[in-house]
Amino acid sequence: MVTQLETKILNKKARLAVVGLGYVGLPLAVHFAKAGFRVLGLDTDQDRVSRIKQGSSYIVDIPSSDIAKILRSGRLQASTDFSLLKSVDVVIICVPTPLKRKYTPDISFMLGAIRSIRRYIPKGALVILESTTYPGTTEELIKPELEKDKKREGKDFFLAFSPERIDPGSKKFPLNKIPKLVGGISPQSGQLAALLYRKIVPQVHLLSSAKAAEMTKLLENSFRIINIGWINEMAMICHHMGIDVWEVIEAAKTKPFGFMPFYPGLGVGGHCIPDDPLYLHWKAKRYGYNPRFIKLAADINAGMPHYAAQRLIRYLKHKPLPKVKILIVGVTYKKDVKDLRKSPPLKFIEALRKYRCQVDYTDPYIPYLEWEDIHSASVELDKKKVGSYDCVVIATDHSNINYKLILDNAKFIFDIRNVYAGASSKKVVRF
């Protein structure tokens, strides 16, 4: 049985299904289809499926032309019908894994996907979980679900975990240039998954277990949240002591070993960094251990929008706050990416609105913003418009913003992203 699936993978005759066509699933489906595999994309969101069928991409890393081309080749099919899983050899799960309140993982999307998969997958299929989750999920949750019909892992199906490592919007690190990690429930499962991913990613590391692969993903993201939390705390310390944190970071970067630069800002956004480390925090507490670094870093980062708003308000005390007009430059969570998931600039806007300030925004990636009670259009930048605001805040440093126009015409600039490093203008205050 293993030999048959190995042969199918080696010859690119294995039919793949990707469940969940978001920022992880769609790029994965497209890369496998471009490599020569026939891929079935499954999603419960009819709008996503319809857009794919029309050859239209909703993911920044995937051009619509790529989707249209592989649709014409017949190597990509999109559907909401999970019964089509009856004809596949491999199922890759890429569904969301958000947090509930009190830092508890929400596994409802994952369980829903697994229960649908269990009903239809044929004997001998390989199932791979890519959704980021707590250590032990694949073995303790996915495996028992798939074994409910008296099937056995390593005999009737094969199960592995391979964490997504997508860097949205990155041209330097596209999916097929990022080394892949794989851990199987059984040795055969790990080897099959590694064999499959080597068809699209040259460098694949096979770990001893699915649990080790799950923990590796959380180590990577916990490293990020902790170091971002630390540099944000460092920025606050430096501000209190009258020291330029940006100068300090640049100086520390001259050390050729033992230091990696992180930069202060409004916190962390997107799906991965705000949530993933807290899966580990939750799981470790169930083992009787309280991981302090993760929670502390999460709390510091979560407080940065309020801290930044407080600092800005101090600079604007000369005018009644309800009459203060503020323009936010960039509302996405990351530079040059059209993504508002847990975006810290949105929390920053929320904090400023509590002071009753008038807040507008400009962002080339978000022409119209609908978030909570905010419904407004992006402001078009020109000399007169920029000069009409009491303050312009650089919240997300998109590359396609005319920063010189802002510098020349703004009354006051609060530069959170250090885009005006080296500027001698007294109207610029850096974070």
Image: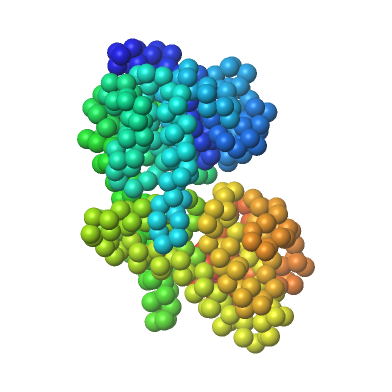
* Camera-side residue of 90 and 359: 90
Residue 323, compared with residue 136, is above or below; it is below
* Camera-side residue of 14 and 127: 127
Quarter of the image where one finds residue 136: top left
Q: How is the image coloured?
A: rainbow
Residue 178, compared with residue 11, is above or below; it is below
Q: Residue at horizontal 57%, vertical 27%?
A: 81
**For residue 52, side relative to residue 192 (left or right):** right
Visible residue check, residue 386 = yes
**For residue 339, side relative to residue 362 (left or right):** left
Residue 299, compared with residue 82, is above or below; it is below
Q: Residue at horizontal 30%, vertical 46%?
A: 135
Residue 87: percent from left, percent from top: 48, 17
Residue 181: percent from left, percent from top: 32, 36
Residue 107: percent from left, percent from top: 42, 46
Q: Say which quadrant the N terminus sits in.
A: top left
* Camera-side residue of 242 and 395: 395
Q: Residue at horizontal 41%, vertical 19%?
A: 122
Visible residue check, residue 28 = no
Residue 264, compared with residue 355, is above or below; it is above
* Extreme-bottom residue of the structure: 318
**For residue 136, side relative to residue 374 (left or right):** left
Quarter of the image where one finds residue 58: top right
* Extreme-right residue of the structure: 384
Total number of numbered labels?
Answer: 0
Residue 356: percent from left, percent from top: 66, 77
**For residue 242, side relative to residue 333 (left or right):** left
Q: Residue at horizontal 52%, vertical 27%?
A: 82
